[in-house]
Structures are given as C-alpha cells and as structure tokens.
C-alpha cells in the first residue's frame, strides 16, 4: 500500500506551519512592532516566504502530485483526499510558474511599501508613495505574465483571489450594479426624510467602546479562548490555526461607527476562520475558499445582521448602559438610522451600504486600466478624484482622503473586486438563511446568534475549499450568484427609511 497521500499531507503541514509562523510576523508588524524593525522584518518574511515556496514548488512535490494524480492511485483515495490532491495540484501548477526570486522580491518590496504608505498617508504625500506603487504595479504585471492569461492580464491577478473569475464576467456585473445604485442614491439624497448623522459622532469614551465591541464579539460566537482583539491603523483578521484567529479594531472617541463596524466586520471574518475544520489543518479542506466568500462572512455580520432592528433590539439597551449620558433621550430607531446613515463620503471603510460598492468599482476600474497599461501611476490622484466626482458626486480635499487611503496598493492588485462580490454573496446567503431558519431574527432580539452561525458553519465554513466560490454559493443557496438579493436588501432597508417607492429593475 502506498503512502503517497500521507507524504503529501506531511509536506503540506510543514508548508502551512511556515506560512503561519510568517503570518504571526505580519500580525506583529501591524500591531506592536517598532518602526525601525521594518527592514529586518521584511527580510525575515522574505526568507520564510522563500522557504515555503521552495518546498511547495520542489521536484519532490511535483513527483508526489503526479503520482497521486495517476488513475491507479487517485481512484484509491477517499473523496476528501481527492479534493485535497486536486486543489494542491492546481496551486502547484500556478506556483511553479513563479520564480522564487520574484516571490522574495515582492515580499520585501511589499513590506517597504507598507511602511512608506503609512508615512505618505499621514503626510498626505502621494509623491512619497508613487515609486512604491509603480514598483508594485510592475510586479503585478510581471506576475500576470508568468501566470499567463487569455485576454486581460488582470484576469491572472483576479484568479489569485477569486478562482475562475474574469474581467469579462466582472465588467457587466459591476456596470449593472452601478446603474442600479446611482439612481437609488439620488432618490435617497432627494428624499424629504433626513436621518441624523450626528448621533454616532457624539463622545463615546474609548475604553467603553472597547468593552462593548468585546461583548458583541462574544455574543456573535467569536471564541476568545481561540483568539484576541488588538488595535491597528487598518483593522484586519489573521489566522494561524482555527484555534488562534485574531482580530484588530480601530477606535475613535467621536465616531462610534469605526470600532463598531470594524469589530463586527472582522468578527465575521474570524468566525469563518475559527469554523474551518481543524482536523484537516494543513490541507485545502481547512482553508478559506476565496476572498469574495471571506468578505461575504464579514459583511453579512457587519451589515445584514449588525445594522438590523432585531440586532439592536438586543444591543441598544446595553449600549445605553455603556454611554448613558451620550445616548440620553435618543431612541433606538434614531440611533440605527444614524449608524446606517447614507451619505457619499471619501473613505471606503466608512462608506455606507448604498455607496460602498461605488468605491470598489472606482478602484477596480483603475486597477484594471493600470494593469492593462491604459493609465499611468503618476495620474492616479487625478483619475481617482475625477471618478469620485462622477460616481459619488464629491472630490477629496487631499490624497490621504483619496488615493492614499487604502493599504491594499502596497501589495499586488486584483483584490478589490472581492469586496463587492462579498456584498453580493452576503445578501444572497442571508436571504436563504432567513428562509430556512424559522424565526431567525426573533432569536437575534434575545441575543442568540447561534442558529445563524450554525447555518454558516455547515454551508460555508466546514466546506473549506471543497468547491469553487461560485459553486459553493450555488450549493448553499441553490442559485447562481446574483446581484438581485443585494439590491432587494437595499430597497427593503433604505427604501423604508427614506420612503422610496420601488423602481423597476
Ligand atoms: Zn473584510
């Protein structure tokens, strides 16, 4: 009897352990590392990345996979092991195209770009960041060339985050969304109903915000015995194992939305990672399927759940206990409307549900055009500002609030579209969860979110990478991914708030 599959799993475990040790360095870099540690940290990360890449693309790994893919061997495998081998073979096929030197160069450059971006954003100085953006774009194009693509080089970059998705599929979907959201946004802005954005901007002492976010995370089902929350400039979730999944948040004393939405959003990501099957640790069955699906989990909790009346029926009395003076004489309804106030704004992470996707479409179009060589990095601030004006009707006062706001362009492009895909998936999943679980939202009113989490665990978390993203959505909901559920959700929630009649769609 052959032990090829055991040999493969041993190797994969080794690689996963190196990658997760590396992830711990990333977590430290973005939370507690002193600024002068950055160069050394970049080298350490590059070494670890190179090490795991080398094991993965080694001839030994290739021979092992080729053996396992032979009919005779493959047919002997269990269904789970077949998935593990298939995904690994696909990853190997992609990874072996990329020279190790390039992987190490990119890691090092990304680390440097991150440190410069932090400074450039603080100073609102695009010129400082420009050479690093140019460099990362260059690496993106280089990567697309070595990976290969049929039509657009952006396809190759997109495929790294959302398997099997192309520019040709994305363009009509995003154009369609924009055409539906823009008139809806106009209707909101022309509505006689005005919500009060000031409530959420009152004074909320920082330590109490912190305690409130921790309490919410616990009710959501985030396991603090398998994780922790810290603070960082840009909130994120990172996992080293399903038993150690960490989140960060960002607190502003005069803007409760920041901590609230960050913690719930990252909590949604973390529930996914904590829900992966640890018995498969090291293999594709204990890995998230795609960034779009990951984002569907965070957005589902942040928006579909975290801005709903049933959620706040439970949490608003608690919030009032934390901030009795700040929220004196303010009703739950007014608070929710303030928290979900719709208004075009400069910063994507602060954007409301209605305008959020316009931010993504803007970035996606710039990325696509830059990678396809149609626009230049030096023109980024100008293009950014003119698109903001066109889609959202506003112009950023400076680059810190414009082109420099996101951390993502310190890395390889291709990532942004997954945010909007996440929004679409989240609304579709939530619609079907609500249909299948009796009285779901009544449970929320009692602080019980366990039935929703159980549903997500079964439909999404426990599946790992068993299916491609599109197929996973189809399995979970019985339907192809669609924008309709998201648009319906906007009409249900904001059509009611702003008294907008449903338009033809
Ligand atoms: Zn996210």
Image (cartoon, rainbow, N blue to C red):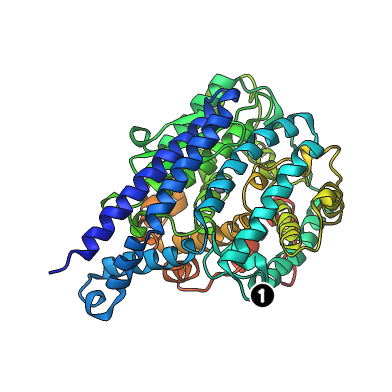
Res 93 seen here: yes
Q: What x and y, as percent, mark residue 13?
A: 30, 50
Q: Residue at x 38, y 44 (%)?
A: 18
In this picture, residue 310 sits left or right of residue 125: left
- Looking at this rendering, what residue extends furthest in the left direction? 1
Q: Which residue is mark 1?
A: 151
In this picture, residue 288 sits left or right of residue 327: left
The C terminus lies in quadrant: bottom right
Q: In this orientation, which residue lies closer to the viewer: 358 or 119?
A: 119
In this picture, residue 125 sits left or right of residue 361: right
Q: Is ligand 1 less than 8 Å from the beta carbon at label 1?
A: no
Depicted 220 relative to depicted 353: above or below: above
Q: What x and y, as percent, mark residue 31?
A: 53, 29
Q: In this orientation, which residue lies closer to the viewer: 182 or 441?
A: 182
Number of marks in the image?
1
Q: What x and y, as percent, mark residue 341?
A: 71, 43
Q: What x and y, as percent, mark residue 173?
A: 67, 69
Q: Which image quarter: residue 422?
A: bottom right
Q: Residue at x 63, y 19 (%)?
A: 325
- Looking at this rendering, what residue extends furthest in the bottom direction? 71
Dot 1 falls on a residue whose secondary structure is loop
Q: Residue at x 65, y 44 (%)?
A: 410
């Amino acid at each position: 009897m052959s032990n090829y599959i055991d040999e493969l799993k041993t190797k994969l475990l080794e690689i996963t352990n190196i990658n997760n040790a590396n992830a711990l360095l990333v977590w430290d870099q973005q939370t507690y590392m002193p600024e002068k540690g950055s160069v050394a940290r970049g080298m350490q990360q590059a070494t670890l990345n190179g090490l795991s890449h080398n094991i993965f693309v080694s001839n030994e790994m290739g021979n092992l996979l080729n053996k396992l893919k032979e009919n005779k061997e493959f047919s002997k495998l269990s269904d789970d092991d077949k998935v593990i081998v298939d995904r690994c073979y696909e990853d190997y096929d992609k990874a072996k195209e990329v020279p190790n030197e390039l992987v190490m160069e990119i890691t090092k450059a990304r680390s440097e770009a991150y440190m410069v971006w932090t400074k450039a954003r603080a100073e609102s100085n695009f010129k400082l960041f420009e050479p690093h953006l140019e460099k990362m774009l260059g690496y993106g194009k280089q990567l697309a060339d070595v990976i290969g693509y049929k039509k657009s080089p952006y396809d190759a970059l997109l495929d790294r985050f959302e398997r099997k998705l192309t520019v040709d599929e994305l363009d009509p979907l995003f154009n369609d969304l924009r055409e539906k959201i823009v008139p809806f946004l106009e209707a909101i802005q022309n509505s006689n109903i005005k919500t009060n954005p000031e409530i959420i901007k009152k004074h909320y002492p920082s330590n109490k915000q912190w305690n409130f976010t921790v309490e919410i995370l616990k009710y959501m089902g985030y396991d603090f015995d398998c994780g922790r929350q810290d603070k960082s400039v840009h909130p994120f979730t990172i996992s080293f194992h399903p038993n150690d999944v960490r989140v960060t948040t960002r607190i502003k004393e005069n803007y409760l939305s920041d901590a609230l939405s960050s913690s719930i959003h990252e909590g949604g990501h973390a529930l996914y990672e904590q829900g992966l099957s640890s018995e498969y640790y090291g293999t594709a069955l204990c890995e998230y399927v795609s960034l779009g699906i990951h984002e569907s989990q965070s957005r589902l909790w942040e928006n579909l759940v975290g801005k709903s009346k049933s959620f706040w029926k439970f949490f608003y009395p608690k919030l009032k206990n934390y901030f009795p003076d700040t929220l004196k004489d303010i009703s739950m309804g007014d608070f929710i409307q303030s928290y979900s106030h719709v208004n075009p704004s400069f910063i994507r992470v602060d954007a409301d549900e209605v305008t959020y996707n316009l931010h993504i479409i803007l970035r996606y179009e710039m990325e696509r055009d830059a990678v396809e060589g149609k626009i230049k990095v030096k023109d980024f601030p100008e293009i950014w500002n003119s698109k903001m004006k066109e889609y959202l009707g506003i112009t950023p006062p400076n680059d810190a609030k414009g082109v420099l706001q996101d951390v993502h362009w310190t890395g390889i492009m291709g990532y942004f579209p997954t945010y909007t895909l996440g929004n679409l998936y989240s609304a579709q999943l939530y619609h079907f969860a609500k249909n299948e679980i009796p009285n779901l939202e009544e449970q929320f009113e009692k602080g019980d979110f366990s039935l929703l989490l159980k549903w997500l665990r079964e439909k999404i978390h426990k599946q790992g990478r068993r299916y491609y993203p599109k197929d996973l959505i189809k399995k979970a909901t019985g339907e192809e991914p669609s924008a309709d559920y998201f648009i319906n959700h906007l009409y249900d929630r904001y059509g009611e708030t702003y008294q907008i009649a449903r338009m033809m769609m």
